[in-house]
Image: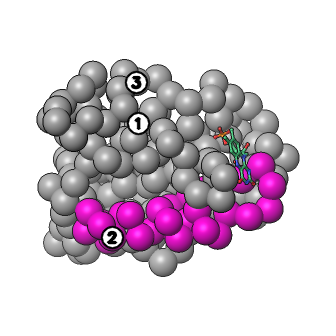
Amino acid sequence: MTRIVGVCGSRRAESTTRAAIAHALDAAADVGAEPDLLDLGTVDLPLYHPDRDEQGESAALCARVRSAHGVILGSPVYHGSYSSTFRNFHDYCGKSEYENTAVGLVATAGGGSYGPALEHMRSTVRGVHGWTVPEQVGLRKASRKVEGDRIVDADTRERLERVARQVVWAAERLHGRE
Ligand SMILES: Cc1cc2nc3c(=O)[nH]c(=O)nc-3n(C[C@H](O)[C@H](O)[C@H](O)COP(=O)(O)O)c2cc1C
């Protein structure tokens, strides 16, 4: 089965990013994939230290990405870019995690600008040789589009579903399943 990991790069209990990633994972499951939500708000992951190979749960978390065929990465926009939480986990990952892995991108913004954050996510995923799909989703004024763990905006739901389907499609082809 095609395994898709969704990474939430926010530590907030009521995270809009987590709601968006969870919705995308549901859409991936609808087309036959096995979803796995990796919520960085609930894990033990100290600040990356280049002199230490493993810290906290890093080995197990990286293994989940390594064994996935596709990954959907989500980050809140912090000061015009991705969050420190997203970046910290990303620094633990490398090419062995992302080899032959299809990647979808989601950014949630309190205001109106998510474009640079998505671009920064795209280029840092290229740095680990992930295969980023062209479809991507930015949520402007994210808190108006999410209630609890539900996406209440129909257009946002549809766009998240499109990213998820594209990641599954690409993951299946990268792994010779189609
Ligand atoms: C430190 C910090 C910096 C932020 N910077 C921006 C920003 O530059 N642009 C913006 O639109 N929203 C910004 N926000 C708002 C968040 O992007 C927004 O609330 C997002 O939906 C939070 O996602 P979450 O609910 O998953 O944590 C910032 C929030 C924080 C805490």
Q: In front: mark 1 or mark 2?
A: 2
* Residue type pointed to by label 2: Arg
Report, in whole angstroms, how far the alpha carbon at label 2 lies from the one at label 3.
Answer: 25 Å
* Residue type pointed to by label 1: Leu
Q: Is residue 177 visible?
A: no
Q: Is residue 104 magenta?
A: no
Q: Are marks 1 and 3 in contact (CB under 8 Å)?
A: yes
For this rendering, which residue is in front, 66 or 46?
A: 46
The CB of the residue at mark 2 lies under 8 Å from ligand 1: no
Picture residue at 27% right of the left edge, 43% below the top = 92
* Few, some or many residues within 10 Å of mark 2 (<14, 14–19, 20+): some
**Among the 4 quarters of the image, the one containing residue 127:** bottom left
N-terminal-most mark, 2 or 3: 3
Picture residue at 25% right of the left edge, 74% below the top = 173
On residue 126, the disc is 2
The quadrant in which the C terminus is found is bottom left
N-terminal-most mark, 1 or 3: 1
Residue 133 in percent (x, y) is at: 43, 73
- Write the start and end of the magenta stretch as one range: 105-131
Q: Are marks 2 and 3 in contact (CB under 8 Å)?
A: no
For this rendering, which residue is in front, 1 or 62?
A: 62
On residue 114, the disc is none
Element class at badge 1: strand
Q: For mark 1, what is the residue?
A: 38
Residue 9 in percent (x, y) is at: 51, 42
Q: For mark 3, what is the residue?
A: 43
Question: How many badges with numbers are in the image?
Answer: 3
Residue 174, placed above or below residue 86: below
Residue 70 as seen in the image, left or right of residue 18: left
Q: Is residue 164 visible?
A: yes
Q: Are marks 1 and 2 in contact (CB under 8 Å)?
A: no
N-terminal-most mark, 1 or 2: 1
